[in-house]
Image: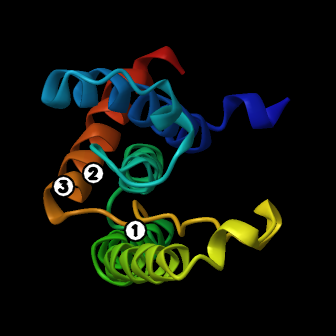
Amino acid sequence: MDLFLNFPLWAALLAIVFAQVIKIPIQYIATRKFKPGLAFSTGGMPSSHSAAVAAVTTGIGIEHGVSSGLFAVSCVISIIIMFDATGVRRQAGEQAVVLNMLVKDFNYFIEEAKVWSKKKEYEKRAELKELLGHQPIEVFFGGITGIVLAFILYPLF
């Protein structure tokens, strides 16, 4: 039953859910396109990874103090995760865009050569996922989301 009283854990989990769900109306406001699948995808505004690590770190800071070793470890891990979201994962997404373009161009060439129409459907390749990482602003607002939610949720525990 102690698991249900673990405030930093619940703050992080609720921050993930909130950040994933809020992506839908934010995307709708920005593009006028309703995409409920965003709730189950990576990337987008705000970063749920950043919201989660910021919420757990804030929760640990509230419960154990910002001078505790546990807060220090959580803070460093959070910084690494947020940095990775804007670095490696974002670059992988940008590379996926270029690779998908190359695959489309190659497939178009094959089609024009009248060989593509004779191939079976299973021979066609699926596109790579392009929305992997985050822009720095998405990570920033994900972090803010996690911190604010942790402070709002703490009195409930």
The residue identified by callout 3 is: 140
Picture coordinates of residue 151, whole percent (x, y):
32, 31
- Label 2, label 3: how far apart the Cα atoms are: 5 Å
User: Which residue does the image show at 44% across and 73% down from the upper left?
Assistant: 104
The residue depicted at 36 percent of the width and 26 percent of the height is 24
Q: Amino acid at mark 2?
A: Gly
Hey, which quadrant is residue 101 in on the image? Answer: bottom left
The residue singled out by tag 1 in the image is 78
Q: Nearer the viewer, residue 50 or 60?
A: 50
Q: Is residue 134 left or right of residue 125?
A: left
Q: Which residue is mark 2?
A: 143
Are the residues tagged 1 and 2 within 8 Å (C-beta)?
yes
> Residue 29: image x %, image y %?
17, 22
Q: Residue at x 25, y 58 (%)?
A: 139
Give the mark, 3 or 1, whose residue is nearer the N terminus: 1
The relative height of residue 100 versus residue 20 in the rendered view (above or below) is: below
